[in-house]
Image (cartoon, helix red, strand yellow):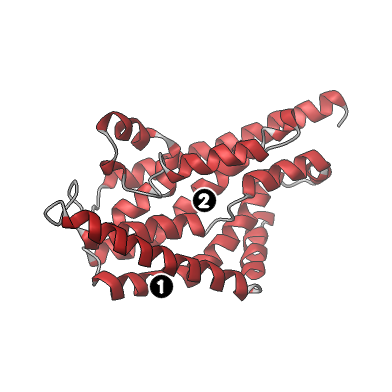
Amino acid sequence: MSPYAAGFVRGFRRAIASPGDLAVRVGFFAVILVVMSALWRAALAAHADTIDGYDLRALLWYVFAAQTAVLGVRPRTVEEVGDEIGSGAVAIAMLRPASVVLLRMAIELGEAGARLLGAFPIGAAITWAFVGAPPSGRSLLLAAPVVLVACACNIASQHAFGGIAFWLQDAKSTWFVYQKLVFLPGGMLIPLELLPHALAAPCRLLPFAAMAYVPGRIAAGHLDPTLLVGQLVWLVMLVAAAVAVFALGQRRLEAVGG
C-alpha cells in the first residue's frame, strides 16, 4: 500500500473512532436545515414560490449538499497547518520520503470520507422529510461523489492557504479570510444565482464555488456537465498549488536553516 493510501485509511479510521464528532456535526446540520427551511419558506412566500429558478424543494436540497460538503472538512485546517509549520513539525516531517502535504491531505480526505458516510444519508433523510424527494433521483446519486470531490478541493485549498505560514509564521488571519470566501463566493450560504449578476459571474469562476456551489447546484437538480468538469479542473489546480507552496516553503526553510 502506498503511503497516501495508508494515510487515507488512517484518517478514515481516526474519524470513525470519534462518533461523537459526527453526532455533533449531524445535529448542527439538522438545526441548519430547520432554520433554512423556515427562512426560505418566508422568502418564497413573497416571490410566487420561486427565486431565480429555485423553489423551496430545490433550495433545501441545495443547502443540504452545500452544507454537507463544507461540514465534511475540518474547519480550522488552515490554522492547524500554520501552527504545524510555525512549530517546526512540518520541517521534521519533510525529512521523510513521502510528500508531507500529499500525505496530510490524504489523511484529511479519509476523515472527510468517513464523516460523509454518516452525514450524507442522514442529511438526505432529514431534507427528504422536510421538502420531499430531490428534484432528480440522478442528481442525488451524482451529488454523493461530487460532495467528496468538493471536500478534496477544500482540503487542498486550505493547505495552499495554510502554507503562507512558511513566510508569516502564522495562518490565523488567513483562516478567517478563507472561511468567509467559502461562505459567500463559494455559495455555502446561498446559491450564487441569488447574488447580483456582477458578483455571481466572477464567483462561479473562483475555486471556492467547487467546494459548495457545485454540489449544491447538482443536488438541486441542475445536471450541468460543465460544473463537474470545472470542479475536477479546480481539484487538480488546487492540489498542484498546495504542492508548489510546500515545495517553495521547504526551499525557504533550507535557505534559512529552518
Q: State the image coordinates of residue 34 (x, y, percent, origin top left).
A: 36, 67
Q: Residue pushed farthest top? A: 255
* Residue at x 80% of width, y 46% of height: 93
Residue 154: percent from the left, percent from the top?
52, 47
Classify residue 56 as left or right of residue 92: left
172 in relation to 116, above or below: above
Looking at the figure, which quarter contains the C terminus? Answer: top right
User: Camera-side residue: 199 or 226?
Assistant: 199
Q: Residue at x 45, y 52 (%)?
A: 149
Q: Which residue is mark 2?
A: 152
Q: Which mark is residue 210?
A: none
Q: Amino acid at mark 1?
A: Pro
User: Would residue 102 appear left or right of 51 to someone viewing this image?
Assistant: right
The image quadrant where one finds the N terminus is bottom right
Report helix, strand or loop for mark 2: helix
From the viewer's side, name the closer residue of 242 and 201.
201
Mark 2, other Cα within 10 Å: few <14 / some 14–19 / many ≥20: many
Q: Which residue is mark 1?
A: 121
Q: Residues within 10 Å of mark 1 (few under 14, many from 20)?
A: few
Task: Give the spatial CA distance, label 2 vs label 1.
Answer: 19 Å
**Front position in the image: 166 or 196:** 196
